[in-house]
Amino acid sequence: MADMTTQHTSQHFFSSLETTPDGLSQGEAEARLLIHGLNQLEIKKKEPLWIKFFRQFTDLMVLVLIGAALVAIAVALIEDQTEKLVDAYIILGVVFLNALIGFIQEFKAEKALEALKNLIAPKARVIREGAETLVEAKNLAPGDLLILSEGDKIGADALLFEANELKVEESALTGESVPSLKTVLMADTPPFPQKAEHTVYQGTSVVSGSGKAIVFATGKKTEFNKIAHMTVSTTKDKSPLQKELFNIGLFVGKVTLLISLSLFFIGVIFQGYSIIEALLFSVAVAVAAVPEGLPATITIALALGVQRLARKNAIVKQLSSVETLGSTTVICSDKTGTLTKNEMTVTEILLGASHAIRVEGIGYAPEGKMIFPETYHQGDFRKLISVAAVCNEASLVQNQGSWRILGDPTEGALLVMAKKGGFDLEKKLLNATRVFPFDSERKRMSVVAQNEIWVKGAPDSILELSTRIQSEGHVIPLTPSIKNEIASACQQMGHRALRVLAVAYREKLPEPLTNALEAERELIFLGLIGMIDPPRPEVGPAVQLCHKAGIRTIIITGDFGATAKAIAQKIHLADTNTPVITGEALNRTDKNELQRILQENQSLIFARVAPEHKKRIVDALKELGEIVAVTGDGVNDAPALKRADIGIAMGITGTDVSKEVANMILTDDSFATIVMAVEEGRHIYQNLRKFVWYIFSTNIGELTTIFLAIFLGLLSPLTAVLILIINLGTDVLPALALGVDSQEKETMNEPPRDPEARIMSRRFVAHFVILGIIMGAMVVGIYILDLMVQGWRWGEAIFPSDPRYRHASTMAFVTLV
């Protein structure tokens, strides 16, 4: 087969692609690197630490506090009273503490992410100057000749000129779980079409076979990086919490400015204060109005939530993403590797024409029993698993307690099945004396073993060549009626989205045996083997919990619709009426029609979609007012991950691009971890409401104390420093306690909150305003009572230096605390 694929590779073919059969010279490769740049991804420049730190000061509420501190500094300098700088120092200290907490948390999250980065192969085998050599993948240049073999990660986009049953796993780009068979471009003259079947792409992996290819695109010109560029150009919306805090900050800022200006003019015009005195008092009121402990409290509460999530296999990159998860209304989930294990698994065997065997256990671990029918022949079964295991080019290996497949996942699934059935894989290689590899024209593979030819392949191909069938230990004629039974069983397996293979053998070999076609005739049919990439065991309960919590889950996959629907039905994410919409159908659907489909169907499956389709679906959901979480692992998922309110990347199978743009990364790739994170987000939001209510009610109490005293013609019992002490001592610490309050039982029994709902609703505000007014009135009452006990009479002037004022002010301070 390899000889056939290289016949067309003429000198003209190489020269047209600006290379030679001996590859590039070292000097030419270096010259091309200067022109085209290094072959590496640059999603975005790394942000300097100082920018990360100063970004913490951009919150509107923080800016109000900084403004108050600057006014306090100006007043102190004008009056030449350095003791008044204490006000400014305290305010700036609170601001700095908040920024430091946020910065440290982001820094820790980034350090955790650095350990997850592992996508493009650091080395690549190339032919340069006629000799095979190993180079760093970043130094690949257009024109380099790549050598590909099983297990290699491909470092650049390249056009194949030699291929020997080459299969490439491309799920990172396409989302498809089944490896793609690659063929050679049979053309001598340009232009050479860069079709997917003739091309290998950066970031994909060789699962079986071998080949050679000419690099034609590196760095920014690869398909991988084109999608990455789409990701960079995608805008990221603010999280619901960021929007909410901005609105709160805007509200507080407006109220503070209005109150401060009013008090300034009242003090100057009606109370006879100097401009400096009135300004200083206005600053004190501004400090009372601004909940300076709120940013720090929210930051700490979110940071604690992030730490809890990290211990449960979820790394959150931005603090606000924790709360966003809690408000999620729709999860758009990939299928391969997210809902499924990305490990092909045999689930059914049809022995002969009528004996159905059920195979338990999922994934590559050879654990799980086989459920046999009451009547079946042990010899027939032993023959079937022997043929499946020996007519096989994959290997099943165990490394540090985990099992993995070297080679094609489909063939690996057969090995796992054989081991579950008791076949000794150590003897596998001893059986086969000659191998005829799988070929896309024959649609089968065969080996010579024990003086027989053992065959596996596509059911229609095997059935067509079979004349007899082994049943109950006997070989009998394969009649048309039996063939129809087998074909019907195969069709039913296909309806269950199983990938079906047939196995057969021939007892007497022709002499001499020169090619596979001579031997693969008059076969004895053994049975059918059905397999599927199974759902993760924890996904079903997690999906049920999502339903209970009122969260929709939509599957968006590059795989086939029937396969995706079968998986969705297994995990109760779909039923027989669930629509399956293909990427081709999406191309014919306008925005309004897409939004109608999304609104009318509770469960949906989008199959065979391209990256732009996934992003388009997310855009449509967001325009409908949904809070969208998107899961993904491939570079094809990255634009949608960035566009979503919360992008969730897989830490094990995820690509660098997906991890870069995601808000959260799952270190165990488990869908169940997402549901746990949603629960944590709701928990945090519940606590957020508690301490926002607490902090604002106390601040209203402080404002009421000040305003009521002024209204009654009294000296304010609270100074700026006293207010800050109250806020720091009795706001932040109790609020922190509320921030870590235990979770309420009904957290996941309620639907997601309305995305348009605000913490500062009228009812919510009315409650804390009423409580604050009662609190302030009680404090002023104690203040007046204490003054009267000390001999003060109504209408008598009182000054800050008066001991009676100091005593009454202390009583008011203690009462408010």
Image: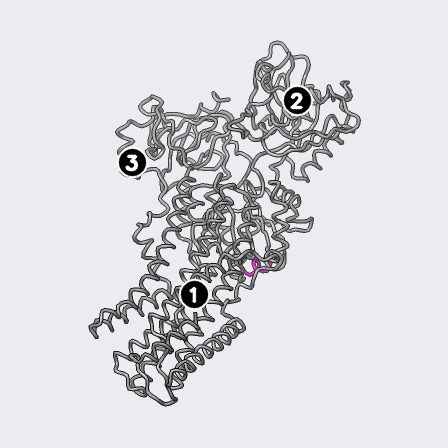
Q: Secondary structure at mark 1?
A: helix
Q: Secondary structure at mark 2?
A: loop
Residue position for label 2: 422
| Left or right: residue 7 compared with residue 569 | left
Q: Which residues are magenta?
A: 591-597
Any part of residue 137 in sight: yes
Kind of residue sitting beneath label 3: Leu
Any part of residue 608 in sight: no
Q: Which of the two discs, 3 and 2, sits closer to the camera?
A: 2
Q: Are marks 1 and 3 in contact (CB under 8 Å)?
A: no
| 633 lies above or below 469 | below
Residue density around tag 2, few if under 14, some if 14–19, many if 20 or more, within 10 Å: few
Q: In the picture, residue 111 is in which quadrant?
A: top left
Q: In the picture, residue 130 is in which quadrant?
A: top left
Kind of residue sitting beneath label 1: Thr
**Disc on the earlier residue, 2 or 1:** 2
How far is mark 3 from mark 2, CA to CA?
54 Å
Q: Are marks 2 and 1 in contact (CB under 8 Å)?
A: no
- Across and down, in percent, residue 140 comes to 34, 33
Q: Are marks 3 and 2 in contact (CB under 8 Å)?
A: no
Question: Is 681 or 223 nearer to us in this picture?
Answer: 681
- Across and down, in percent, residue 572 comes to 66, 47
Residue position for label 3: 33
Q: Residue at x 65, y 39 (%)?
A: 497
Q: In the picture, residue 517 is in which quadrant?
A: top right
What predominant SS class does the magenta segment belong to?
helix
**Is residue 622 found inside the magenta-colored segment of the image?**
no
Q: Secondary structure at mark 3?
A: helix
Residue position for label 1: 730
| 476 lies above or below 167 | above
